[in-house]
Amino acid sequence: MAGLQRRLLLVVGLLAWVVTDASAQYTIQRRQKQQQQVAEQEENKHNPYEAFGGFVEGGITNDYYDHAAWLAERRRIRKERNTFEFEAKFSTSALQFENWTAGGNNTFSGLATLYMRHQYKRNKFSSDLKVNTRYGINFIDNVHFKNVDELKIEELMSWSFRKSWSYSAKINFRTQLTDGFASRTDRTLISALMSPGFADVSVGFTYAPAGASYKLTLSPLAGNMITMLDERLYEKGSNGVPAGKKFYSGVGPSINASFDRTFFAKKWLRYRSTLYGFYALSNLKEPPTCRWDNWIDIALSKYLSVNLYGVVYYLHSASPKAQYQYSATLGLSYRFKNK
């Protein structure tokens, strides 16, 4: 009997030792796991994508991460901050005569226009970039002549300081792409790339109410520069640039105003207008420089439109009289806007 009791006590002791040892091991492992989780949470606090589950370059550190949701949010933010518009137009006409007793000239003309605009806005900062180019050419009895050639680039950067007002810096650039001649029969060179070229840099204030179709920029300090860089032209002097010089510049105040609006429910009518004025304090005897551009676009279908364009331009150093240009075309058009 005594031997049986000793054996029973030995078995109970062994079981108690095993259970105690296993409990201690389990407690240590659980504490180690808890410490590891706390360390991971501390590490994820520095993760820039914490809202989407803690995605880092090395992989996923959070069970709640959804890569599709993260990409969708990035696309939403990108679209919210960026507005992009692209528009291309092309119109042409042709007239051909063969053995026509009443006479006439064989003619062909074409006009292409391209307009791009990118707007970016984040918090108080905004950027508005516009690129506008027009190029036209005609052939009369197999003699070609370029009659339209213009490239315009505008950039306006603003920092809002009040509801509708912002500090702003604006850059305007304008030139032509290819050589220009006096007429179809007179091949005297009168223009080339950056000859003349016009550049305006200004700082001031912009008034642009939210949702409004217009924008006004007042610049107390602005600089205007005219270039004649082509070696074939700068020796003659033109557009206010003295003969033998490549640059002419002036300093003074400037004003820029723009309007852009579509009408009717289907937005088939659009009117755009820009007005620019500059007065050179360095030459008070010279009248201000002014330019007023206007566009009217009538969409007949998705790829067909009527386009009206007109500009009034006054640069006293180029001509004492105001210059006019206008066109009315019917042609193909394509327009894309992301929102």
Image: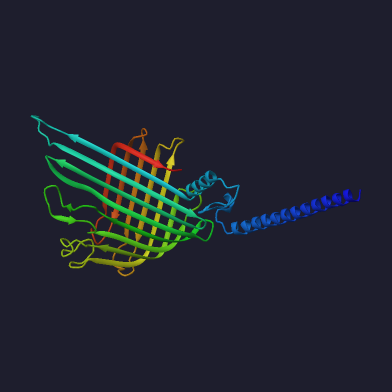
Q: Nearer the viewer, residue 210 or 45?
A: 45
| Residue at 40 percent of width and 36 percent of height | 268
Task: Point out the residue furthest to the bottom here.
Answer: 282
In the picture provided, is 321 more to the left or to the right than 51? left
| Residue at 65 percent of width and 55 percent of height | 37
Tally of marks: 0
Q: Quadrant of residue 230?
A: bottom left
In the picture provided, is 263 more to the left or to the right than 27? left
In the picture provided, is 84 more to the left or to the right than 324? right
> Where does the image place residue 71, in percent across and percent down from the top left?
50, 46
Q: How is the image coloured?
A: rainbow
> Where does the image place residue 20, in percent across and percent down from the top left?
78, 54
> Where does the image place residue 115, in percent across and percent down from the top left?
34, 46
Q: Nearer the viewer, residue 276 or 42?
A: 42
Q: Quadrant of residue 287?
A: bottom left
**Vertical relation: 239 (above or below) 273:** below
In the picture provided, is 17 more to the left or to the right than 188? right
| Residue at 21 percent of width and 47 percent of height | 147
Q: Nearer the viewer, residue 331 or 7?
A: 7
> Where does the image place residue 8, in percent across and percent down from the top left?
86, 49
Task: Point out the residue furthest to the right here.
Answer: 1
